[in-house]
Image: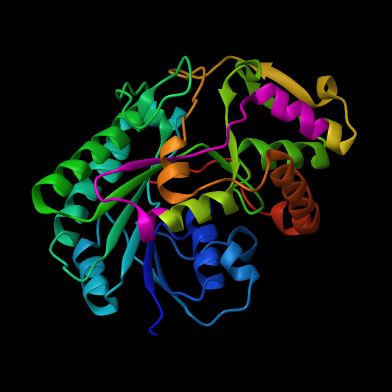
Amino acid sequence: MPRQRYLVIGSNSFSGASFVAGLLGAGAEVMGISRSPEADDVLLPYKWISHDRFSFRQLDLNRDLERIEAVVREFRPDYIVNFAAQGMVAQSWACPEHFFQTNTVAMVRLHDRLRRFKFLKKFVQASTPEVYGSTAGPVDESAPLKPSTPYAVSKAACDMNLIAFQRAYGFPAALTRAANVCGPGQPLYRIIPRTVLCILTGKKLRLEGGGSSVRSFIHIRDVVEGTLKVASEGVPGEVYHLATDRTQTIRELVLEICRRMGVSFEECVETTEGRLGQDAAYLLDCSKARTQLGFVPKLTVEDAIGETIEWVKRSLPRLRELPAEYIHKE
């Protein structure tokens, strides 16, 4: 039986690289595309395993669409999964046009090319719960879209167009909206590795808005499993939530990390103002993924914290040399 072929766009991202690792572990043949060269090995989970079924192309959705189309035509993937996006909420206020260009315009142009490839079994778009804005309680996939930031608006526009393409052309597209992903290999500006790194290097953690926002954290390996299920079993035109039933504030998360590492929260953290458009809570009802796909998260946020602490400690000499803050690229 031939190996399944996956094309992963945004393979340098945390979710993309972790998904590649999961695919390779499942025996698939994988090609990755990202606009930048492959990141440092310490930030690419697929580099942590032995494999010979992955190839990489450095291509930019905004500049290299025809070359990407040629790669798809040559590689003939069964599945394409897209994780590529301008993804930082706060920075989307400073240069919203960059977010709309990448997250909306470039994606619409890509979808319009891909819908013509009849060999494609499924296209999976990694969206975000931020398209709902702040939620007062758990929402299912039929909830109205009320995005609060340019980033979220750009993602919502992409989602709506993709669903329109599915209805009009029969494009086999399905979407995921995952809660806050976490685990080893995550960029250092994300809250769990940032907290761990601050503690280990003696720096103060700046906690926006005192950490009052409520979030659901889900281990990246559970997201990988859920995304695989959406690719193989998801219904085209449908959206699937990937989250756990547990929610907590960012402050509670940081308190747990401090407790694990034996340090005082008060000594390690300083509170700052909340960011513009910061949503109070993202609460997702995951009944559809559970009933239709049999998706049940197996790991906990404590598992992610423990693994991230060990990863940062083990990799600290190298991580010290890498940028700890987000660097925006057009």
299 relative to 140 in the view: left or right: right
Comparing 288 with 203, the one in front is 288
62 relative to 284 in the view: left or right: left
Percent of width and height locating residue 25: 56, 71
Quadrant housing residue 325: top right
* Residue range (magenta): 230-258
Quarter of the figure that contains the C terminus: top left
Quarter of the figure that contains the N terminus: bottom left
Percent of width and height locating residue 42: 65, 61
284 relative to 163 in the view: left or right: right
Comparing 69 with 90, the one in front is 69
Percent of width and height locating residue 80: 33, 62
Comparing 211 with 79, the one in front is 79
Q: Is residue 248 visible?
A: yes
Percent of width and height locating residue 281: 51, 20
90 relative to 108 in the view: left or right: right
Q: Extreme front residue here?
A: 291
Residue 248 in magenta stretch: yes
Q: Is residue 328 visible?
A: no
In percent of the image, x 88 and y 31: which residue is there?
263
Residue 187 in magenta stretch: no
